[in-house]
């Protein structure tokens, strides 16, 4: 048995995207039950200059697909950020999951030492495959998933950490 | 070159604990500058039944040291949750970093298939070393670090995602 760069990234994100989908399902059901306009949740944010829930979900999707594409050397599929409803956000997660599942682990095998460059207007950022997963892909992905959870929790959704973690 | 279970866990957490320390430093400086009682930040929370900032930091520490101890088969050092100030929380992070750095990567090498059991009053949870890192240790650790960030951000601290991610 061994542990790989693939194991450290894609299955972690797939699992967490599944939990995110389930949190959004609970939020949609709660909104319906309490006759709350779902867009109030979709547009909720923790600070005026933080992204709202919809953009957190889109950013989690972006983080996951960019990681898979960069590590595997594939083109990163473009998903326009047009989602404004719970069903559309579920669809966005589902498309992301489909892409991640389509990535052959063999393409990521042995990529821990390969240079990965993130193009930024403020200057390129240079990683290896390993340092990219450790210091960018995972922390960035979880940032958006957890903030989505925190937005829902802050807005009164009855969820707990187990709804985020799921069962092994 | 290869990538290991150690690489996927301990350095990721060490890096993120460093960023958490730097976020708390910024919060302490902001409180001093604005003459805000620091305990208002330390006790701030996103929902009445969520943990406050101090407990999020303690929980991030707990998640990191439990992960290192479980994977390496070492005793998990007990850190009582007595911190109530920014300097005490910095000390807690520093103790956690010292413990994580003390763990010999060789102890974690090849542990991806070993059974790991988490004792819970609701029933034991069974993992392998790999599924524990993927589905528990990493998501749980990031949950508390990101929620700490979100609490500070929600309370008006001028930080952005780069303060959380850091530089490679």
Image (cartoon, coloured by chain):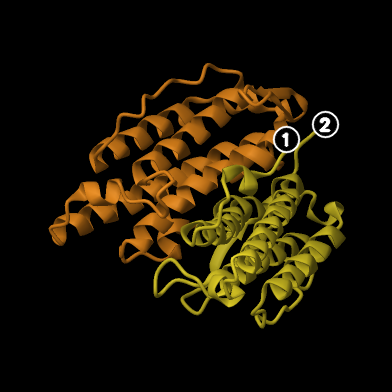
Chain colours: A orange, B yellow
Q: Which residue is identified by label 2? A: B1
**Residue A61 point in image, percent of width and height:** 44, 35
The picture places residue A19, in percent across and down from the top left corner, at: 41, 50
Residue under the image location 61 percent in, 56 percent down: B132
The dot on residue A130 is 1
Q: Residue B58: which quarter of the image?
A: bottom right
Q: Is residue B91 left or right of residue A56?
A: right
- The chain carrying label 1 is A
Q: Quadrant of the C terminus of chain B?
A: top right
Q: Is residue B165 above or below residue B56?
A: above
Q: Is residue B156 visible?
A: yes
Residue neighbourhood size for the residue with mark 1, other residues' Cα within 10 Å, grouped as few (<14), some (14–19), many (≥20): many
- Horizontal and vertical percent position of residue A140: 57, 42
Spatial separation of the CA atoms under disc 2 and disc 1: 10 Å
- Residue placed at 58% from the left, 55% from the top? B142
Q: Is residue A81 left or right of residue A1?
A: left
Query: Which one is in front, B27 or B57?
Result: B27
How far from the left and from the top, in percent, is residue A73?
61, 18
- Residue closer to the observer: A56 or B76: A56
Q: Which residue is at a point 42% across and 20% down the rendered structure image?
A: A78
Circle 2 SS class: loop
Residue at image coords 52%, 35%: A63
What quarter of the picture does the N terminus of chain B occupy? Answer: top right
């Amino acid at each position: 048995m061994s542990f790989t760069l693939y194991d450290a990234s894609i299955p972690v994100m797939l699992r967490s995207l599944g939990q995110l989908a389930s949190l959004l399902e609970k939020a949609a059901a709660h909104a319906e039950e309490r006759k709350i306009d779902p867009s109030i949740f979709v547009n909720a944010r923790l600070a005026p200059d933080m992204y709202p829930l919809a953009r957190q979900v889109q950013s989690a999707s972006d983080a996951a697909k960019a990681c898979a594409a960069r590590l595997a050397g594939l083109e990163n599929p473009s998903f326009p950020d047009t989602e404004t409803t719970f069903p559309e956000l579920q669809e966005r997660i589902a498309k992301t999951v489909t892409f991640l599942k389509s990535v052959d682990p063999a393409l990521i095998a042995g990529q821990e030492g390969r240079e990965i460059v993130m193009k930024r207007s403020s200057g390129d950022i240079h990683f290896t495959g390993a340092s990219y997963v450790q210091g960018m892909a995972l922390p960035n992905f979880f940032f958006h998933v957890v903030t989505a959870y925190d937005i829902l929790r802050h807005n009164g959704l009855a969820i707990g950490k187990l709804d985020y973690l799921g069962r092994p």
